[in-house]
Amino acid sequence: MPTPDATTPQAKGFRRAVSELDAKQAEAIMSPRFIGRRQSLIEDARKEREAAVAAAAAAAPSEPGDPLEAVAFEEKEGKAVLNLLFSPRATKPSALSRAVKVFETFEAKIHHLETRPAQRLRAGGPHLEYFVRLEVPRGDLAALLSGVRQVSEDVRSPAEPKVPWFPRKVSELDKCHHLVTKFDPDLDLDHPGFSDQVYRQRRKLIAEIAFQYRHGDPIPRVEYTAEEIATWKEVYTTLKGLYATHACGEHLEAFALLERFSGYREDNIPQLEDVSRFLKERTGFQLRPVAGLLSARDFLASLAFRVFQCTQYIRHASSPMHSPEPDCCHELLGHVPMLADRTFAQFSQLYWFTVEFGLCKQNGEVKAYGAGLLSSYGELLHCLSEEPEIRAFDPEAAAVQPYQDQTYQSVYFVSESFSDAKDKLRSYASRIQRPFSVKFDPYTLAIDVLDSPQAVRRSLEGVQDELDTLAHALSAIG
Protein backbone atom coordinates (compact mmCIF):
# COMPACT_ATOMS: atom_id res chain seq x y z
CA MET A 1 0.00 0.00 0.00
CA PRO A 2 1.56 3.36 -0.99
CA THR A 3 2.08 5.93 1.77
CA PRO A 4 -0.15 9.03 1.23
CA ASP A 5 1.48 12.37 0.51
CA ALA A 6 1.98 14.32 3.75
CA THR A 7 0.09 17.40 2.44
CA THR A 8 -3.07 15.70 1.23
CA PRO A 9 -6.29 15.50 3.28
CA GLN A 10 -5.90 11.71 3.14
CA ALA A 11 -2.56 11.95 4.91
CA LYS A 12 -3.93 14.21 7.64
CA GLY A 13 -6.72 11.73 8.29
CA PHE A 14 -4.21 8.87 8.39
CA ARG A 15 -2.10 10.65 11.04
CA ARG A 16 -5.16 11.48 13.13
CA ALA A 17 -6.30 7.83 13.09
CA VAL A 18 -2.87 6.61 14.20
CA SER A 19 -2.76 9.20 16.97
CA GLU A 20 -6.16 8.15 18.27
CA LEU A 21 -5.11 4.48 18.17
CA ASP A 22 -1.92 5.23 20.14
CA ALA A 23 -3.93 7.13 22.73
CA LYS A 24 -6.34 4.23 23.20
CA GLN A 25 -3.44 1.75 23.56
CA ALA A 26 -1.75 3.99 26.08
CA GLU A 27 -4.98 4.30 28.03
CA ALA A 28 -5.42 0.52 28.04
CA ILE A 29 -1.87 -0.06 29.21
CA MET A 30 -2.20 2.47 32.02
CA SER A 31 -5.55 1.09 33.16
CA PRO A 32 -5.65 -0.39 36.69
CA ARG A 33 -6.62 -3.77 35.27
CA PHE A 34 -3.51 -3.97 33.04
CA ILE A 35 -1.19 -2.62 35.74
CA GLY A 36 -2.50 -5.18 38.15
CA ARG A 37 -1.96 -7.97 35.64
CA ARG A 38 1.56 -6.77 34.87
CA GLN A 39 2.38 -6.56 38.57
CA SER A 40 0.94 -10.04 39.00
CA LEU A 41 3.24 -11.45 36.29
CA ILE A 42 6.26 -9.77 37.86
CA GLU A 43 5.29 -11.09 41.27
CA ASP A 44 4.81 -14.59 39.86
CA ALA A 45 8.24 -14.47 38.23
CA ARG A 46 9.80 -13.23 41.48
CA LYS A 47 8.21 -16.01 43.49
CA GLU A 48 9.16 -18.62 40.90
CA ARG A 49 12.74 -17.43 40.96
CA GLU A 50 12.90 -17.45 44.76
CA ALA A 51 11.47 -20.96 44.76
CA ALA A 52 14.06 -22.12 42.24
CA VAL A 53 16.89 -20.63 44.28
CA ALA A 54 15.55 -22.31 47.41
CA ALA A 55 15.24 -25.65 45.60
CA ALA A 56 18.77 -25.36 44.28
CA ALA A 57 20.10 -24.61 47.74
CA ALA A 58 18.20 -27.56 49.18
CA ALA A 59 19.53 -29.87 46.46
CA ALA A 60 23.16 -29.17 47.39
CA PRO A 61 23.32 -27.62 50.85
CA SER A 62 26.87 -28.69 51.60
CA GLU A 63 28.62 -28.10 48.25
CA PRO A 64 31.50 -25.63 48.73
CA GLY A 65 31.19 -24.40 45.17
CA ASP A 66 30.27 -25.65 41.75
CA PRO A 67 33.39 -26.34 39.66
CA LEU A 68 31.53 -25.12 36.59
CA GLU A 69 31.42 -21.65 38.12
CA ALA A 70 35.17 -21.47 37.61
CA VAL A 71 34.86 -21.74 33.83
CA ALA A 72 32.46 -18.80 33.51
CA PHE A 73 34.14 -15.85 31.81
CA GLU A 74 33.71 -12.34 30.41
CA GLU A 75 32.17 -10.99 33.59
CA LYS A 76 30.86 -7.45 33.14
CA GLU A 77 28.20 -5.48 34.94
CA GLY A 78 27.47 -8.44 37.17
CA LYS A 79 26.95 -10.80 34.22
CA ALA A 80 28.81 -14.05 33.54
CA VAL A 81 29.00 -15.87 30.21
CA LEU A 82 29.04 -19.67 30.37
CA ASN A 83 29.25 -22.54 27.88
CA LEU A 84 27.38 -25.69 28.91
CA LEU A 85 26.82 -29.19 27.58
CA PHE A 86 24.00 -31.31 28.99
CA SER A 87 22.02 -34.40 28.03
CA PRO A 88 18.28 -34.99 28.43
CA ARG A 89 17.17 -37.47 31.05
CA ALA A 90 15.83 -40.62 29.44
CA THR A 91 12.93 -40.71 31.91
CA LYS A 92 11.84 -37.11 31.38
CA PRO A 93 10.34 -35.92 28.11
CA SER A 94 10.80 -32.38 26.82
CA ALA A 95 14.19 -32.05 28.50
CA LEU A 96 15.13 -29.05 26.42
CA SER A 97 11.98 -27.13 27.31
CA ARG A 98 12.59 -27.89 30.99
CA ALA A 99 16.15 -26.56 30.73
CA VAL A 100 14.97 -23.46 28.85
CA LYS A 101 12.45 -22.88 31.65
CA VAL A 102 15.35 -22.82 34.11
CA PHE A 103 17.17 -20.30 31.92
CA GLU A 104 14.05 -18.10 31.80
CA THR A 105 13.62 -18.28 35.56
CA PHE A 106 17.07 -16.85 36.16
CA GLU A 107 16.78 -14.30 33.33
CA ALA A 108 19.59 -15.96 31.40
CA LYS A 109 20.19 -14.61 27.92
CA ILE A 110 20.82 -17.42 25.41
CA HIS A 111 23.48 -16.47 22.84
CA HIS A 112 23.63 -19.84 21.08
CA LEU A 113 21.86 -23.20 21.30
CA GLU A 114 22.50 -26.35 19.27
CA THR A 115 22.30 -30.14 19.38
CA ARG A 116 25.33 -32.36 19.00
CA PRO A 117 26.02 -36.11 18.83
CA ALA A 118 26.47 -37.34 22.39
CA GLN A 119 30.14 -37.59 23.37
CA ARG A 120 29.38 -40.04 26.18
CA LEU A 121 27.01 -42.73 25.00
CA ARG A 122 25.15 -44.68 27.71
CA ALA A 123 23.06 -47.81 27.38
CA GLY A 124 19.49 -46.71 26.72
CA GLY A 125 20.52 -43.09 26.97
CA PRO A 126 20.03 -40.28 24.46
CA HIS A 127 22.20 -40.01 21.38
CA LEU A 128 22.09 -36.21 21.39
CA GLU A 129 23.26 -33.58 23.80
CA TYR A 130 22.72 -29.84 23.94
CA PHE A 131 25.28 -27.07 23.79
CA VAL A 132 24.24 -23.65 25.05
CA ARG A 133 26.11 -20.40 25.47
CA LEU A 134 24.31 -18.10 27.86
CA GLU A 135 24.68 -14.97 29.92
CA VAL A 136 23.39 -14.95 33.48
CA PRO A 137 23.65 -12.70 36.55
CA ARG A 138 26.76 -13.80 38.42
CA GLY A 139 24.89 -14.14 41.67
CA ASP A 140 22.46 -16.62 40.11
CA LEU A 141 25.08 -18.83 38.46
CA ALA A 142 25.25 -21.53 41.16
CA ALA A 143 21.47 -21.77 41.44
CA LEU A 144 21.07 -21.94 37.65
CA LEU A 145 23.57 -24.79 37.38
CA SER A 146 21.81 -26.70 40.13
CA GLY A 147 18.49 -26.14 38.38
CA VAL A 148 19.85 -27.47 35.08
CA ARG A 149 21.13 -30.58 36.86
CA GLN A 150 17.67 -31.28 38.23
CA VAL A 151 16.13 -31.50 34.75
CA SER A 152 19.05 -33.00 32.81
CA GLU A 153 22.22 -35.01 33.32
CA ASP A 154 25.92 -35.03 32.45
CA VAL A 155 26.09 -31.26 32.84
CA ARG A 156 29.62 -30.12 32.06
CA SER A 157 31.72 -27.46 30.41
CA PRO A 158 32.73 -28.14 26.79
CA ALA A 159 36.00 -26.32 27.37
CA GLU A 160 38.82 -28.64 26.31
CA PRO A 161 41.61 -29.19 28.84
CA LYS A 162 44.63 -27.05 28.13
CA VAL A 163 46.98 -29.45 26.35
CA PRO A 164 50.30 -28.22 24.94
CA TRP A 165 50.44 -28.18 21.16
CA PHE A 166 51.69 -31.33 19.51
CA PRO A 167 52.05 -32.24 15.83
CA ARG A 168 49.15 -34.21 14.35
CA LYS A 169 50.48 -34.49 10.80
CA VAL A 170 53.97 -35.60 9.83
CA SER A 171 54.48 -32.35 7.90
CA GLU A 172 54.07 -30.45 11.18
CA LEU A 173 57.42 -31.85 12.30
CA ASP A 174 58.80 -28.88 10.35
CA LYS A 175 57.88 -26.92 13.50
CA CYS A 176 59.70 -29.32 15.84
CA HIS A 177 63.21 -27.90 15.67
CA HIS A 178 63.80 -26.40 19.12
CA LEU A 179 67.40 -27.02 20.17
CA VAL A 180 69.01 -27.39 23.57
CA THR A 181 72.19 -25.35 23.23
CA LYS A 182 74.00 -26.05 26.51
CA PHE A 183 76.41 -28.44 24.72
CA ASP A 184 76.78 -26.33 21.59
CA PRO A 185 80.43 -25.57 20.67
CA ASP A 186 79.57 -21.87 20.42
CA LEU A 187 78.36 -21.74 24.05
CA ASP A 188 79.92 -24.63 25.99
CA LEU A 189 83.39 -23.68 27.23
CA ASP A 190 84.20 -27.35 27.81
CA HIS A 191 83.25 -28.43 24.29
CA PRO A 192 86.31 -29.79 22.43
CA GLY A 193 85.50 -27.53 19.48
CA PHE A 194 84.89 -24.32 21.45
CA SER A 195 88.21 -22.69 20.48
CA ASP A 196 88.28 -24.15 16.95
CA GLN A 197 86.76 -21.52 14.66
CA VAL A 198 87.08 -23.74 11.59
CA TYR A 199 85.11 -26.52 13.30
CA ARG A 200 82.45 -24.11 14.53
CA GLN A 201 82.02 -22.65 11.06
CA ARG A 202 81.74 -26.15 9.61
CA ARG A 203 79.04 -26.98 12.15
CA LYS A 204 77.04 -23.92 11.15
CA LEU A 205 77.25 -24.90 7.49
CA ILE A 206 75.92 -28.41 8.17
CA ALA A 207 73.29 -27.09 10.59
CA GLU A 208 71.89 -24.87 7.85
CA ILE A 209 70.95 -28.02 5.90
CA ALA A 210 68.69 -29.06 8.77
CA PHE A 211 67.18 -25.60 9.18
CA GLN A 212 66.27 -25.46 5.49
CA TYR A 213 64.91 -29.01 5.32
CA ARG A 214 61.15 -29.55 4.91
CA HIS A 215 59.15 -32.75 5.11
CA GLY A 216 59.10 -34.58 1.80
CA ASP A 217 62.46 -33.25 0.62
CA PRO A 218 65.28 -35.71 -0.04
CA ILE A 219 67.91 -35.29 2.67
CA PRO A 220 70.80 -33.27 1.19
CA ARG A 221 74.12 -35.06 1.00
CA VAL A 222 77.17 -33.79 2.88
CA GLU A 223 80.65 -33.91 1.38
CA TYR A 224 82.71 -34.84 4.41
CA THR A 225 86.31 -33.68 4.76
CA ALA A 226 89.31 -35.95 5.10
CA GLU A 227 89.60 -35.04 8.79
CA GLU A 228 85.95 -35.91 9.42
CA ILE A 229 86.31 -39.27 7.66
CA ALA A 230 89.45 -39.99 9.71
CA THR A 231 87.53 -39.30 12.93
CA TRP A 232 84.71 -41.56 11.77
CA LYS A 233 87.20 -44.32 10.92
CA GLU A 234 88.75 -44.28 14.38
CA VAL A 235 85.36 -44.45 16.09
CA TYR A 236 84.02 -47.06 13.65
CA THR A 237 86.92 -49.51 13.89
CA THR A 238 87.29 -49.17 17.67
CA LEU A 239 83.61 -49.78 18.42
CA LYS A 240 83.19 -52.52 15.84
CA GLY A 241 85.90 -54.46 17.62
CA LEU A 242 83.75 -54.52 20.78
CA TYR A 243 80.38 -55.26 19.21
CA ALA A 244 80.90 -59.02 18.90
CA THR A 245 81.25 -59.40 22.67
CA HIS A 246 79.23 -56.47 24.03
CA ALA A 247 76.36 -55.70 21.61
CA CYS A 248 73.02 -57.49 21.49
CA GLY A 249 72.17 -59.82 18.62
CA GLU A 250 69.68 -57.41 17.06
CA HIS A 251 72.37 -54.75 16.74
CA LEU A 252 74.85 -57.18 15.20
CA GLU A 253 72.35 -58.42 12.62
CA ALA A 254 71.25 -54.94 11.55
CA PHE A 255 74.83 -53.63 11.48
CA ALA A 256 75.81 -56.33 8.98
CA LEU A 257 72.87 -55.33 6.75
CA LEU A 258 73.83 -51.65 6.96
CA GLU A 259 77.36 -52.49 5.87
CA ARG A 260 75.93 -54.42 2.96
CA PHE A 261 73.25 -52.01 1.76
CA SER A 262 73.77 -48.52 3.22
CA GLY A 263 77.42 -47.62 2.82
CA TYR A 264 78.62 -48.42 6.34
CA ARG A 265 82.42 -48.61 6.00
CA GLU A 266 85.37 -47.35 7.95
CA ASP A 267 86.36 -45.04 5.07
CA ASN A 268 82.85 -43.70 4.36
CA ILE A 269 80.37 -41.77 6.48
CA PRO A 270 76.90 -42.98 5.41
CA GLN A 271 74.50 -40.43 3.95
CA LEU A 272 71.22 -39.99 5.85
CA GLU A 273 69.07 -40.31 2.73
CA ASP A 274 70.46 -43.79 1.99
CA VAL A 275 70.07 -44.91 5.60
CA SER A 276 66.55 -43.49 5.81
CA ARG A 277 65.44 -45.51 2.78
CA PHE A 278 66.87 -48.66 4.35
CA LEU A 279 65.00 -48.07 7.62
CA LYS A 280 61.77 -47.25 5.83
CA GLU A 281 61.79 -50.65 4.15
CA ARG A 282 62.71 -52.48 7.36
CA THR A 283 60.54 -50.94 10.08
CA GLY A 284 58.85 -47.86 8.65
CA PHE A 285 61.21 -45.46 10.45
CA GLN A 286 62.60 -42.48 8.55
CA LEU A 287 65.43 -40.07 9.30
CA ARG A 288 65.19 -36.30 9.33
CA PRO A 289 68.20 -33.95 9.64
CA VAL A 290 68.49 -31.90 12.81
CA ALA A 291 70.96 -29.14 13.68
CA GLY A 292 71.83 -30.29 17.21
CA LEU A 293 70.48 -31.63 20.48
CA LEU A 294 66.71 -31.41 20.11
CA SER A 295 64.35 -30.59 22.96
CA ALA A 296 62.89 -33.72 24.54
CA ARG A 297 59.33 -32.81 23.57
CA ASP A 298 60.15 -32.27 19.89
CA PHE A 299 62.32 -35.38 19.75
CA LEU A 300 59.69 -37.65 21.31
CA ALA A 301 56.92 -36.10 19.18
CA SER A 302 58.88 -37.11 16.09
CA LEU A 303 59.05 -40.71 17.26
CA ALA A 304 55.25 -40.85 17.28
CA PHE A 305 55.46 -40.58 13.47
CA ARG A 306 58.32 -43.10 13.32
CA VAL A 307 60.67 -40.27 12.42
CA PHE A 308 64.12 -40.13 14.01
CA GLN A 309 65.77 -36.70 14.00
CA CYS A 310 69.41 -37.29 13.17
CA THR A 311 72.49 -35.06 13.14
CA GLN A 312 74.85 -34.91 10.14
CA TYR A 313 77.90 -33.29 11.72
CA ILE A 314 80.68 -35.28 13.39
CA ARG A 315 82.42 -34.84 16.75
CA HIS A 316 85.64 -32.86 17.07
CA ALA A 317 88.77 -34.68 15.92
CA SER A 318 90.54 -34.06 19.24
CA SER A 319 88.01 -36.21 21.13
CA PRO A 320 86.95 -39.13 18.91
CA MET A 321 85.91 -41.42 21.77
CA HIS A 322 83.58 -38.95 23.48
CA SER A 323 81.11 -36.27 22.44
CA PRO A 324 79.11 -34.08 24.86
CA GLU A 325 76.25 -33.95 22.34
CA PRO A 326 74.75 -36.28 19.74
CA ASP A 327 76.60 -36.50 16.44
CA CYS A 328 76.40 -38.79 13.40
CA CYS A 329 78.68 -41.36 15.07
CA HIS A 330 76.20 -41.65 17.93
CA GLU A 331 73.15 -41.73 15.65
CA LEU A 332 74.46 -44.01 12.89
CA LEU A 333 76.38 -46.49 15.04
CA GLY A 334 74.14 -46.49 18.10
CA HIS A 335 70.55 -45.69 17.17
CA VAL A 336 70.09 -46.68 13.53
CA PRO A 337 70.97 -50.40 13.84
CA MET A 338 68.44 -50.79 16.66
CA LEU A 339 65.74 -48.89 14.76
CA ALA A 340 66.13 -51.51 12.02
CA ASP A 341 64.70 -54.16 14.38
CA ARG A 342 60.88 -54.35 14.27
CA THR A 343 60.37 -55.30 17.92
CA PHE A 344 62.73 -52.62 19.19
CA ALA A 345 61.28 -49.98 16.87
CA GLN A 346 57.86 -50.54 18.45
CA PHE A 347 59.22 -49.73 21.89
CA SER A 348 61.45 -46.78 21.00
CA GLN A 349 59.65 -44.31 23.28
CA LEU A 350 61.07 -44.42 26.82
CA TYR A 351 64.57 -43.16 26.37
CA TRP A 352 67.38 -42.58 28.81
CA PHE A 353 67.79 -45.92 30.59
CA THR A 354 66.52 -48.00 27.68
CA VAL A 355 67.08 -46.68 24.17
CA GLU A 356 70.15 -44.69 25.24
CA PHE A 357 71.69 -46.79 28.04
CA GLY A 358 69.71 -50.02 28.14
CA LEU A 359 70.97 -53.54 28.77
CA CYS A 360 69.25 -56.84 27.96
CA LYS A 361 69.76 -60.54 28.61
CA GLN A 362 70.59 -62.86 25.72
CA ASN A 363 71.65 -66.50 26.06
CA GLY A 364 72.40 -66.03 29.74
CA GLU A 365 74.63 -62.99 29.19
CA VAL A 366 74.03 -59.27 29.59
CA LYS A 367 74.40 -57.29 26.35
CA ALA A 368 74.12 -53.61 25.47
CA TYR A 369 71.38 -52.22 23.24
CA GLY A 370 71.39 -48.54 24.25
CA ALA A 371 72.74 -46.16 21.61
CA GLY A 372 74.70 -44.18 24.18
CA LEU A 373 76.59 -47.36 25.02
CA LEU A 374 77.00 -48.66 21.47
CA SER A 375 78.53 -45.35 20.33
CA SER A 376 80.90 -44.85 23.30
CA TYR A 377 83.94 -47.10 23.64
CA GLY A 378 84.55 -46.16 27.27
CA GLU A 379 80.98 -46.53 28.49
CA LEU A 380 80.46 -49.76 26.56
CA LEU A 381 83.32 -51.26 28.60
CA HIS A 382 82.10 -49.59 31.80
CA CYS A 383 78.47 -50.78 31.63
CA LEU A 384 79.46 -54.47 31.54
CA SER A 385 82.17 -54.15 34.17
CA GLU A 386 81.83 -54.72 37.93
CA GLU A 387 81.62 -50.99 38.71
CA PRO A 388 78.01 -49.91 37.99
CA GLU A 389 74.85 -51.14 39.73
CA ILE A 390 72.63 -53.29 37.50
CA ARG A 391 68.88 -53.31 38.25
CA ALA A 392 65.96 -55.16 36.69
CA PHE A 393 64.11 -52.92 34.25
CA ASP A 394 61.10 -51.21 35.80
CA PRO A 395 59.64 -48.22 33.92
CA GLU A 396 58.36 -46.64 37.14
CA ALA A 397 61.84 -46.66 38.66
CA ALA A 398 63.69 -45.80 35.45
CA ALA A 399 61.46 -42.76 34.85
CA VAL A 400 62.63 -41.10 38.09
CA GLN A 401 66.19 -42.40 38.30
CA PRO A 402 68.72 -39.50 38.24
CA TYR A 403 71.04 -39.72 35.24
CA GLN A 404 74.45 -38.42 34.25
CA ASP A 405 75.13 -36.45 31.09
CA GLN A 406 78.73 -35.53 31.91
CA THR A 407 80.16 -38.92 32.88
CA TYR A 408 79.29 -42.63 32.90
CA GLN A 409 76.07 -43.84 34.50
CA SER A 410 76.27 -45.36 37.97
CA VAL A 411 73.05 -47.36 37.45
CA TYR A 412 71.83 -49.37 34.46
CA PHE A 413 68.60 -51.28 33.92
CA VAL A 414 68.57 -54.73 32.32
CA SER A 415 65.54 -56.19 30.51
CA GLU A 416 64.78 -59.89 30.17
CA SER A 417 64.03 -59.29 26.48
CA PHE A 418 62.74 -56.58 24.14
CA SER A 419 59.28 -58.13 24.26
CA ASP A 420 59.29 -58.04 28.05
CA ALA A 421 60.47 -54.42 28.04
CA LYS A 422 57.78 -53.51 25.51
CA ASP A 423 55.04 -55.12 27.62
CA LYS A 424 56.21 -53.28 30.73
CA LEU A 425 56.38 -50.01 28.83
CA ARG A 426 52.88 -50.50 27.43
CA SER A 427 51.55 -51.13 30.95
CA TYR A 428 53.37 -48.05 32.25
CA ALA A 429 52.03 -45.84 29.44
CA SER A 430 48.46 -47.00 30.08
CA ARG A 431 48.63 -45.45 33.56
CA ILE A 432 49.67 -42.01 32.35
CA GLN A 433 46.74 -39.65 32.90
CA ARG A 434 45.78 -37.85 29.70
CA PRO A 435 42.50 -36.27 28.57
CA PHE A 436 42.50 -38.47 25.47
CA SER A 437 44.32 -41.30 23.73
CA VAL A 438 46.10 -41.11 20.39
CA LYS A 439 46.80 -43.55 17.59
CA PHE A 440 49.18 -43.33 14.65
CA ASP A 441 47.59 -43.84 11.24
CA PRO A 442 50.29 -45.31 8.97
CA TYR A 443 48.24 -44.61 5.83
CA THR A 444 47.91 -40.85 6.33
CA LEU A 445 51.03 -40.46 8.54
CA ALA A 446 48.85 -38.60 11.03
CA ILE A 447 48.03 -38.84 14.72
CA ASP A 448 44.37 -39.65 15.35
CA VAL A 449 43.06 -38.16 18.59
CA LEU A 450 40.63 -40.64 20.14
CA ASP A 451 38.46 -38.23 22.10
CA SER A 452 34.98 -39.36 21.08
CA PRO A 453 33.07 -42.60 20.48
CA GLN A 454 33.00 -41.78 16.78
CA ALA A 455 36.81 -41.51 16.62
CA VAL A 456 37.24 -44.83 18.44
CA ARG A 457 34.70 -46.46 16.12
CA ARG A 458 36.65 -45.31 13.05
CA SER A 459 39.85 -46.81 14.44
CA LEU A 460 38.08 -50.06 15.28
CA GLU A 461 36.92 -50.35 11.68
CA GLY A 462 40.55 -50.30 10.56
CA VAL A 463 41.48 -52.93 13.14
CA GLN A 464 38.57 -55.10 12.00
CA ASP A 465 39.80 -54.95 8.41
CA GLU A 466 43.23 -56.15 9.51
CA LEU A 467 41.73 -58.94 11.62
CA ASP A 468 39.61 -60.09 8.68
CA THR A 469 42.73 -60.27 6.51
CA LEU A 470 44.61 -62.30 9.12
CA ALA A 471 41.66 -64.62 9.67
CA HIS A 472 41.45 -65.25 5.94
CA ALA A 473 45.18 -65.97 5.84
CA LEU A 474 44.88 -68.50 8.68
CA SER A 475 41.97 -70.26 7.03
CA ALA A 476 43.92 -70.48 3.77
CA ILE A 477 46.90 -71.98 5.57
CA GLY A 478 44.56 -74.49 6.93
Image (cartoon, rainbow, N blue to C red):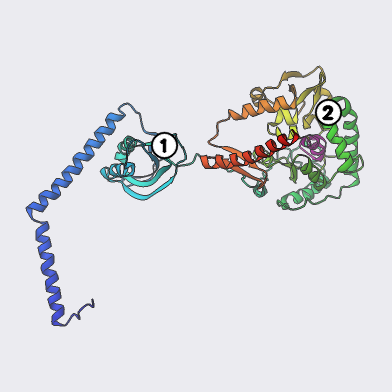
**Which stretch did the figure color magenta?**
323-340
Q: Where is residue 196 in the image (x, y as percent from the top left)?
A: 82, 43
Q: What element carries label 2?
A: helix
155 relative position to 371: left or right: left
Q: Residue 279, image x and y in percent? A: 78, 41
In magenta segment, residue 328: yes
**Residue 448 vertical placement versus 19 (above, below):** above
**Which mark sits nearer the N-terminus, 2 or 1?**
1
Q: Nearer the viewer, residue 5 or 437?
A: 437
Dot 1 alpha-carbon crowd within 10 angstroms: few under 14, some 14 to 19, many 20 or more? some
Residue type (three-letter) at the residue carrying disc 2: Gly
Regarding residue 164, the answer to whether it shows in the image is: no
From the viewer's side, name the closer residue of 371 and 349.
349
Q: Pointer 1: what residue?
A: 125
Residue at image coords 90%, 36%? 234
Residue corresponding to mark 2: 249
Residues at badges 2 and 1 in contact (C-beta under 8 Å)?
no
Disc 1 marks a residue whose amino acid type is Gly
Q: Would residue 141 appear left or right of 234 to someone viewing this image?
A: left
Most frequent secondary structure within the magenta stretch: helix
Q: Where is residue 458 in the image (x, y as percent from the top left)?
A: 57, 43
- Secondary structure under tag 1 reads loop
Identify the image quadrant of the N terminus.
Answer: bottom left
**Residue for point 57% across, 41% down:** 449
Decide if residue 125 is in sight here: yes
Q: Residue at x 44, y 46 (%)?
A: 116
Q: Is residue 7 magenta?
A: no
Residue 398: x and y, percent?
67, 24
